[in-house]
Image: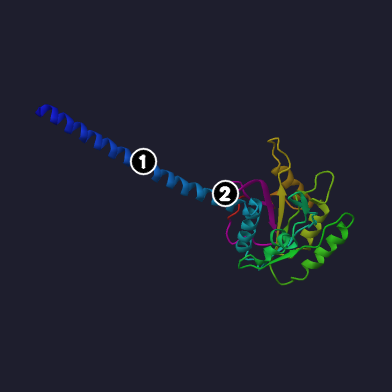
Amino acid sequence: MLSAELSIALSTCLIGIYISAVKILIWIGCLSTSISHVQNTDNDLFMRDIWYGDNRDLVKWAILCHLAEDFNASRILQILFYRSDCYKQVIIDGEKRDIPKAVIQHFRNVQKIRLLESKIPIEVFAKEFKDGGRQDYLQEVTRWLRNFPKEKLIVFLDPDTGLQPRKVGLEHVSEEEANKIWDALKPGDVFVFYQHQTNRSGKDWIGPKGKQLANAMNLGEDKLKLARGPEIARDVIFFYAQKDGTGPKKSTAEN
């Protein structure tokens, strides 16, 4: 009899332990799910934050701000080679609707970079770059540069894709334009040039473009330096050179 009672008591105890263990496991599972949800939410926010601004813009303005500080520049001038866009429509319940001007102004206003909270002021040359108007555009750019006679400048050429290939288009800066803008700089000014990747074949594209740009500027290749952000945007680089200057107070860009 005693043995049977002990057996029943032991069985009851084991069942209780089993139920408690199951409850603990369920609680741990719920906690893990909750933690995982929080982590996934944070990751979602992180991904959205990454894509809020184009990664190339992050690299571009990080490099420009660092160069302005390194060369003790007093102003950044962005020559935008701006081309206006014709925006497509959205469709709501089968009806085509234009994108409101306020939305375009918020997300596509090329002048907004002037509001960047930087110690160094930014100015944008945003005149439209049109077919048949390259010479007029170049003349206006060089006149604009003369508005800053006593300031050390970062002069940033920001075309859609970079230096011209054999056939120049509106997405390119021509060799002549690069030459004339370089010639218009004062001693101490810093010339910065945006270049997008020119091929996807795996062949070197940076060296040939650097050589082409240096030749256009009548500059030794060793004088043209390189800055980039390969962990953020692998397909863009920035060439830069100082006009008859002593160089940066420190070197943070990749040579």
Q: Which residue in the protein does label 1 denote? A: 26
Q: Which residue in the protein does label 2 denote? A: 47
Mark before the other along the chain sequence, 1 or 2: 1
Q: What residue type is labelled 2?
A: Met
Q: Which residue lies furthest to the right in this view?
A: 132
Location of residue 22 by image quarter = top left
**Residue drawn at (77%, 51%) of the image:** 95
Counting every numbered tag in the picture gives 2
Location of residue 62 by image quarter = bottom right
Residue 103, numbered circle: none
Dot 2 falls on a residue whose secondary structure is helix
Residue 98: x percent and y percent?
77, 56
| Quarter occupied by the N terminus | top left
Along the line of sight, the residue nearer the viewer: 73 or 87 = 87
**The magenta segment:** 224-251
Q: What residue type is labelled 1?
A: Ile
Along the line of sight, the residue nearer the viewer: 43 or 229 = 43
**Residue drawn at (71%, 60%) of the image:** 103
